[in-house]
Image (tube, coloured by chain):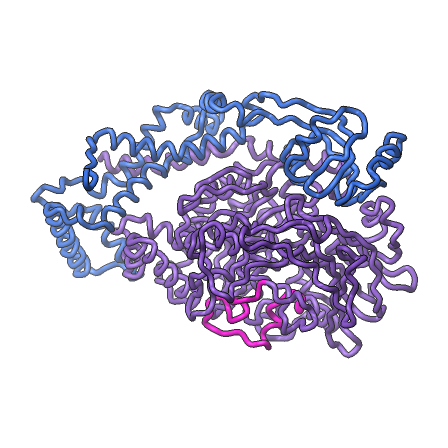
Chain colours: A blue, B purple
Amino acid sequence: MTIADRARGWLREPLLHFALIGLAIFALYGWRNPVDDDSRTITVTAPRVEALAANWAEAWQRPPTPAEIDALIRDDIKDEIYYREAVRLGLARDDDVVRKRMRNSMEFIATSQAEARAPTDAELQAWMDKDPARYRLPALLSFDQVYLGGARDGAAALTAKLRAGADPAMLGEHGTLPTSMDGADAEAIGSSFGDGFADAVAVLPVGQWSGPVESGLGWHLVRLRKVTPGQTPTLAMVRQRVENDWRADNRRRAEAAAYQALLDGYKIKIEKPGS
Amino acid sequence: MATKGAIAALPLLALVLTLAGCGDKAADKAKAEAEVTAKAEAASPYPLKPLWGDTHLHTANSSDAFALGARLGPEDALRFARGEAVTSSTGIKAQLERPLDFLVVSDHSDGLGAIKAIYDAPRLMLRDPTLRRWHDMMHEGPAGMQKAAGELITGFANKTLPASMMDPSKNAERTKTIWTDQNAIVERYNEPGKFTSFFGFEYTLMPDGNNLHRIVIMRDGKAQADKVVPFSSTVGTSVDQLWDYMDTYEKTTGGQILAIPHNSNVSNGLMFQLTQTDGKPMTAAYAARRAAHEPVVEITQIKGDSETHPFLSPNDEFAGFGQAGWELGNLSMTQLSTPSMYTGNYVRAALQHGLEIEAKTGVNPYKFGVIGSTDSHTALSTADENNFFGKHAGVEPSATRAMLPQSLGKAGRVGWQYLAGGYAAVWAKANTRAEIFDAMKRREVYASTGPRMTVRLFGGWDFAPADLQGDWVKAGYARGVPMGGDLKPAGKAGAPTFIVSALKDPIGANLDRVQIVKGWIDAKGATHEQVYDVVWSTPATRKPGANGKLPPVGDTVDLKTATYTNSIGAPTLQTVWTDPAFDPAQKAFYYVRVLEIPTPRWVAYDIVRYKAKVGPEVQLKSQERAYSAPIWYDPKA
């Protein structure tokens, strides 16, 4: 077992996810403000001083002098005192910009880990089973066609020729469109012939030239060769698509769940004007 | 202690997640791609139908897009292009009527993700007063966001961005993370045979606001793409340096990469110069380098059309398409345009100057195919007039967007002047990265202003009308060359012949006419152009007049309902055309322009849907079109 295999094994362990994600959030956000906003004690910690110095160095492209560090600390204390007093006075509550920024930070935390999580096969199977129609493999058609152009004059004569064995690749407005399609689904047929053509072809008799059939381009004579009915796939057959859908949804769910968990802790009353 | 332990765990987390991404998936993808190609090759030795895509799309990872309100990222962009319904940044349900075959998510490399980072950053982390001010403005609401974006784009053009945004090592670090994250998503949506997603970015070179932007596209997989960081125009301040970067990419990864210039129309003459970028006369080596790195040019997109200008082509009555507003000045509107700049702004003139430079140096630097794309900044590739989601999130569908001023800097450009954008058509044998990229390299591509018309062009010496009775596609490849090619040496005396075929979009408008645009250079070195109507609808009743011009096809547009009918025009037009004025001593090129019948523009749909009020100057109809890559003739060949 390689290290990579082992790591993949660990990654399927949901408990580990929660532990790691919790750890990461704590690491990112926990250390910055471990104090109680109501406290009357301000401790400027060593990591905090390091962070202040690093930010300063980034702006000025040199480390701060001891006097500059002292000034940064004094300013940081001033920030902190005003911040706590403003919170006590409820100023943050009345400031839409502050509120929006806080919300943005919370949403960022909720979704930033979602992309990293790899789904299990069981999760994907369950996801697929929720909407089997979406993943059902479409019916596939194999057919030959002769394009008559915008008018269907002469369709009967051409049909007779084709039934007598004429080469379809040499008749009608040939060359502009594929003469044959093999195992094509409605989407692929639609991209060449327009909407509805696949449906019209699917009901033709198999093995003989018939039509004319109308498309977005005009009229066609068609010989349907084979219809492969749609089928329910195994996960392996559509895994990429299922996983993409699951991941896209997972991010939405992560955000919604984070919000719901918070929302559940609140009792909401709405008093509409006039009610 | 707990704090230190938690921080120490972060690299571990990153490592574990990186490992999870590796494995056999890359090998599986390569195998799938090879199988798809083999199957297509077995079915036909040449491409049977064009693939449609957008090579130029921005998401929230582009700083300007984000600042203007885009909140949809690469994943939304890929899902949308693949045909899924998504919710736009302004909350509108968006879906394509038909999926695309391929997409290049091409976010600006400059400050990739930077604005999003400024927006998301805890304010404490922003020490730079400008960044902090932008952060505050963005959070104030849409007006503040637009103002911040304007300042950012101007600051970028004038090189007055805050130092921390210009620091190459810091940018590289941030870019690397966003790039590899994005690549993981791009890789997940690449599905050989069904949908191709390329790794790419936009190199946004813009000296004094003159647009020299390029889209850069890689042929390869995630392993190669992850080895590099998108090249920034704050690092490489001339296109020569971009080519150096591309050379390095190919050398270090063993992969392949190409660049696609765009919006030459707002370059104030710099995109297609007669000289090198340093102002010296162009050498053969320089010309060869440009042609090798830039085999394709984006000729049409939301910010106007770059085929030609009425000043350059006074005899071409269809030359004014997509010029309103865009002809006024450079991209930032900090410098107005003068007619003397136009020869460097437009593709048809560039193709002619390519012949001129070739006559002097022996190499044609401007031997390129053409494609269309959107340059949409909404993560939504919407080039259809009836489903246009705007240039950026600030002009997603609404009653007012058509009349909103859109200029950066000086006043001048207005919302309605945006085109709905174009798409790229590629004659690839299979829907894979390799096949599509290789078709671009051999220039077997064409541009559309949106409708998915099928356009074929073959050039040879012995094509005759009777060929159309037989398998002319096979004959075209066997006895001639397809679009993008060089005419084979003439076996005997006579003029070159061309098989031309155009088929309407299966869910779109009928065709008005097919034209061949010829450009050439005479013995004195002067360049010329001529537009020929070669086949058109209802030829029995439409005859060229005394001035040689065909009467217009007519107009079925009903502006009250924003509809048209296909009661005029033709669904398909084909002919074999022989150059009537061929001089075997003159270098020349030939490309096809296909015109649809008139249809409503996106503004006309806005008027019906949203009761939009617009001024009398606003264009409400247009004849959409396709441009093929040229075929070249060289007497020395």
**What residue is at 34 percent from the left and 52 percent from the top?**
B118
Q: Position of residue A67 (x, y in %)?
A: 16, 61
- The residue nearer to you, when weighing B220 against B298, is B298
Question: Is B252 rendered above or below residue A10?
Answer: below
Q: Classify residue B518 by image quadrant.
A: bottom right
Q: Position of residue B637 (x, y in %)?
A: 82, 63
Task: Reply yes or no: does residue B325 show up in magenta.
Answer: yes
Left or right: where A233 falls relative to B147:
right
Question: Is B373 rendered above or below residue B634?
Answer: above
Q: Position of residue B375 (x, y in %)?
A: 52, 54
Left or right: where B2 falls relative to B573:
left
Magenta part of the protein: which range?
B322-350
Q: Is residue B467 visible?
A: yes
**What residue is at 67 percent from the left and 49 percent from the top?**
B566
Left or right: where A200 falls relative to A59:
right
**What residue is at 75 percent from the left and 45 percent from the top?**
A150
Task: Reply yes or no: does residue B389 show up in magenta.
Answer: no
Q: Residue furthest bottom?
A: B524
Q: Position of residue B622 (x, y in %)?
A: 60, 59
Q: Residue furthest right?
A: B492
